[in-house]
Amino acid sequence: MDFLRGPICIGVYTWREGIRKRSYIGFLILSLLVIFGASFITSFMNQRMVGEAQTDIDLKLIKDICVTTISIFGMLITVFISASMVPNEMENKVVYSVLSKPLNRFQYLLGKFMGIQAIILLNLLLMGGLFFVALYLRQGIPPTLLLWSILLTYFEFLIVSAFTFAISCTSTSAVLPTIAGLFIYITCNLTQYLKDVIERAGQTGEKLDELIGGLARVLYNVLPNLQYFSLKTQIVNSPPNDPPADVLIPNLIIYGLVYAMVGFILAYWVFRRKEL
Amino acid sequence: MKRPMNLILAVLLLVAGTLGTLQGRHIDSIREGQVFYEWIIAAGTHVRLFDDEKVRTKRTVEYANDVAFLKEVEKAATGLLPDVPREERVMDDGRTVGTLAYLTASDENYDLLFKLARNGALDGVRKDFLARARDQKLKLAQYEGYVSGANIFNLFFGFRQLAANFIWLEVDRLWHEGTVHLMVPLMESCVLLDPHFIDAYLLGAWHVAYNVTAKLDDTPENLKVWSDEYGTCVGEKESFYYWAAEFLQSGIEHNPRNYKLPFDLGFAIYKNKLNDYPNAVAALKTAVSVPHEVWVPRQLYIVEELNGQFEEARAGWIDYMKRYPNSATGSSVAPRFVRRNEGRIAEKRMLEVLQALDKATDPDERAKLQAEADKYRAEALKIWESMGDEPYAVGRRLRMKAQDLIRENKIRDAIGVLEKARWESNDFWDEGSEMIIRLKQKHGLNLSLSEKMWILRQEGGTDCRGMPPELRGRNKRRN
């Protein structure tokens, strides 16, 4: 238990520091405004009726806009927070005084990582909570599938956050890790392309072609695939008890945890070798 | 200390990375199973509801590969599927479908179908499916971005649904501009991006069948031409109805658990626009077979009545009364419809007995049949009288009176009564008009211009230019 006391203190401190960041507050306010404003976007549409019957088209629009808003702004917050926590402390020299306490580097990093996750979770709870209430008020029944969607979004962010965090440990400024974080998000969403490269490789029979195919196979297996998490947008509009979704959700959670562990090990490996 | 720690971290990283890779592969296999499962449901639904081998349309040709491959899958899955007796797999229209297609009818079987799609015994077939889907040989699988590899779907970072919404907003704008002809390709793109966008199918079909055709005249039968695309005779206006029907059918294949699509197909298109009651009954039966709103079965019973299935309609209304005894419809509307159908059943039986009477030669048998016919007649009349001034009952009573007058050879009086009946009862208009024309024709009475035109249209039949000879004389296509 003593081992965790230090990380928890660091985590609380990181959380307090994070929620005071202007970029975080700015993104959060913007996302909340978009979620709130989604209800009004549908007011401009006049196609909500089929003859005499009301359609759910406005509800679908609100759901899709809100899930996307949560994903995009959540991802921006995740990247900015994960990229800036360690470099800022190095820049301000706070890390030196913290590490002079009876706390090793692993505990320090674990605390930082936990604090970052607390901020991401808070952000998701605020955005998801507002979305939940908005949907509940509109359709009259609790949108429980939304909770699964938000849970999956968190595990997607967990992967992005862990790898951005690992890169931030190599840097003394937040700029490079931020760019790298965005790059990670984009690249990991395009991993699916590699599958196509693998399928088509070797058709010409040339060595280079086969080599590219082999490289694509390695990258496809190593890089996390964030497209798996696109299930979060599908389940919001799908009927409950969808057998594939029921099987995929726990597997995606495990996938998120495993890749977060990879990111964290990388972060620690880099950080423990850093000369401070 | 540094070196062992580095080694430990390297091993940890390797272990975690390998676990991640293995988990990724596991998710890949689940997603492959998911795509296969979704295709099985779509192809099974297509076979069950819309695949009529007798009528070749654009859809039956396009989906022929899917139908053939579903049979291959079923063959490979022999032993893995439950035994469903052949008689249970007979559809309402007399076709017998395979077990796999049959199982797609109920969402209770979806767990079983998903397990089947992931079953190791079907690895070969699943790989074959993925290869065919990637090569776009299976029309019903092309909606799944996962199997198409590098394509537009990935560009949206998993936000295909949002992209579909924005396209839909453009459809909305075009609608207000009045450029409806530009809406169709956009609506198709919209459902390609999000095949589960129910309202896009509903609104799209409604726009095309109702709004686009609002100012078009019905095409006279002799001006219609055979359409290979829809497998029936169409004019300009009717082609829009069939487009809407096929748009909804494609929606049903991808969303078989949603009642709104088959309901709109049955009610808004087949019943209201095409007067194709057999297909309307089939579509509405599909709608009530999945979780639905309370008003869905009511339309089914109304269409069953229009289709002459009075016994089914009556049984349906009785069931409705039992299920919703306290609702306004269950307590006041449903009993009226029960009576209506009982009256029609009595009339139908009377007609059957009278037809037997015409053929009978034995005096004893004739007397017996006459008594039976009189019994049914009295029963029907009693029902119509018990319904008081309700227009439907008034129409039926006057019809019976007209038939009495015909039997007494008072033809002009009978025509007068039928004239009154068709003005009293809206439901009786078509039937009454036809009876008047037939009577005038039979007895050589003067026909009005519109009545002459009606006869000409009937003589022309439902055949049209370009119709394949083997289909001439056939009335309506099945879907």
Image (cartoon, coloured by chain):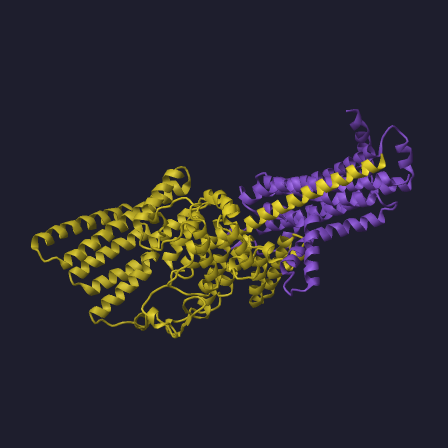
Residue drawn at x 52%, y 52% is B124
Spot the residue most to the top. Answer: A1
Chain B: its colour in the image is: yellow
> Is A254 on the left-hand or right-hand side of B433?
right
Instruction: Name above or below for residue B463 compared with residue B37.
Output: below
Chain A: its colour in the image is: purple
Residue drawn at x 23%, y 70% is B441
Q: How many numbered marks does the figure carry?
A: 0
Residue B371 shows in the view: yes
Q: Quadrant of residue B26?
A: top right
- Image quarter in which the N terminus of chain B is found: top right
Q: Nearer the viewer, residue B246 or A177?
A: A177
Q: Residue A138, percent across and down?
A: 60, 43
Q: Residue A39, percent across and down?
A: 65, 48
Spot the residue most to the left. Answer: B363
Q: Quadrant of residue B328?
A: top left
Residue A28 shows in the view: no
Q: Residue B406, percent across and down?
A: 19, 61
Instruction: Name above or below for residue B210 compared with residue B318.
Output: below
- Image quarter in which the C terminus of chain B is found: bottom left
> Is A266 on the left-hand or right-hand side of B479?
right
